[in-house]
Image (cartoon, rainbow, N blue to C red):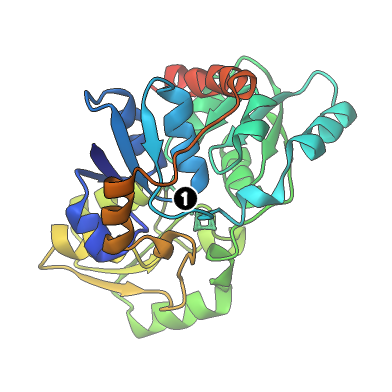
Amino acid sequence: AVIVAHMYQNDDVQAVADMVGDSYALSKYCTNRPENTIVFCGVDFMAESAKILSPEKTVLIPVANAGCAMADMITAEQLIEFKKQYPGYAVAMYINSSAAVKAESDVIVTSSNALKVIRGMEEKNIIFGPDRNLGSFIAKQCPEKNIVLWNGFCPTHHLIKRDDVIKIKETYPKAELLVHPECSPEVTELADYAGSTKGIIDYAAASECEEFIIGTEVGVMYQLKKNNPDKKFYIMSEELICPNMKKTTLESIVSCLEKGEHEISVPQDVAEKAKKALNRMLELGK
Ligand code: 13P
Ligand code: SF4
């Protein structure tokens, strides 16, 4: 088996994984592996995406019920009803969504490729879901598109408030502020950089600055500190924890490997439709 882990996983889980990455990097990596089994240390929608892209493989998730609160904010039925209000609109869906929602979408995006994918779409009128924050971050940069937003958000990233950002910037005046675009717009506009987890890690490594305030889930601190031992990182708040990401433990990985536990399955008709939208992302996001 190959073990992959999202950057929000516990430090010890990241340490044993064959590959650690953001949602986009992990979904691409899994398609190119020779192993027949993928152990996906992350949340449900990530493991589901790996299964949809590699249906011939066995995809296991170490813990059952590791969902994403934002993905749960939209169902396929709700999306079908919403589309009726906007005839002719294309649906661009954040990868943080269920397989059934992806199956009702035209293209999938991740935080690292959303701008490129949306700019590359021939359609001007677009429904974007479920994250209103990533959606408005992209819409601001694509004035040529007419983007309608679904009203979802990430409860973890929403913990970051503008006043707290202003305070911490006063405490560390030399630090650059790096945030995930799932943060609210009033936070993102104060940032020196807003991007995916991998984008944040790459930015910190390339920057000449020596101190950074980090506005995303605490899990990224592990890679940031490991890759940049001479730089200083301050997390916006120790409460920036995604509870479902933290459910995976080393014990759950061992149990999953020994017993083949928690196999991901996606109904074939749903998987086929969702795969079209995911493949369009891989094509436009190249
Ligand atoms: P990335 O696309 O940066 O991996 O983020 C996924 C996610 O769930 C952030 O909350
Ligand atoms: Fe979902 Fe937020 Fe957790 Fe990311 S951090 S997996 S968006 S709940």
- The image shows residue 152 at horizontal and vertical percentages of 69, 52
Q: Quadrant of residue 142?
A: top right
Q: What residue appears at the point 26 percent right and 55 percent down from the top-left corner?
A: 254
Q: Please, what is the three-letter code of the amino acid marked with disc 1?
A: Val
Q: Is residue 165 above or below residue 30?
A: below
| Residue 230 point in image, percent of width and height | 10, 68
> What residue is drawn where x is 18% and y is 54%?
16
Q: Is residue 190 above or below residue 118?
A: below
* Residue position for label 1: 43
**Residue 285 visible at all:** no
Picture quadrant of residue 246: bottom left
Q: Quadrant of the N terminus?
A: top left
> Between 24 and 211, which is closer to the camera in this rendering?
24
| SS type, badge 1 | loop
Answer few, some or many: residues within 10 Å of disc 1's Cα (few below 14, many 20 plus, some between 14 and 19).
many
Q: Is residue 275 visible?
A: yes
Left or right placement of residue 100 versus residue 221 in this view: right
Q: Residue furthest left?
A: 230
For the image, the number of numbered tags is 1
Residue at 56% in and 53% down:
68
Picture coordinates of residue 56 (x, y %)?
39, 20
Is the CB of mark 1 within 8 Å of ligand 2? Answer: yes
Q: Tell which of 79 and 181 is nearer to you.
A: 79
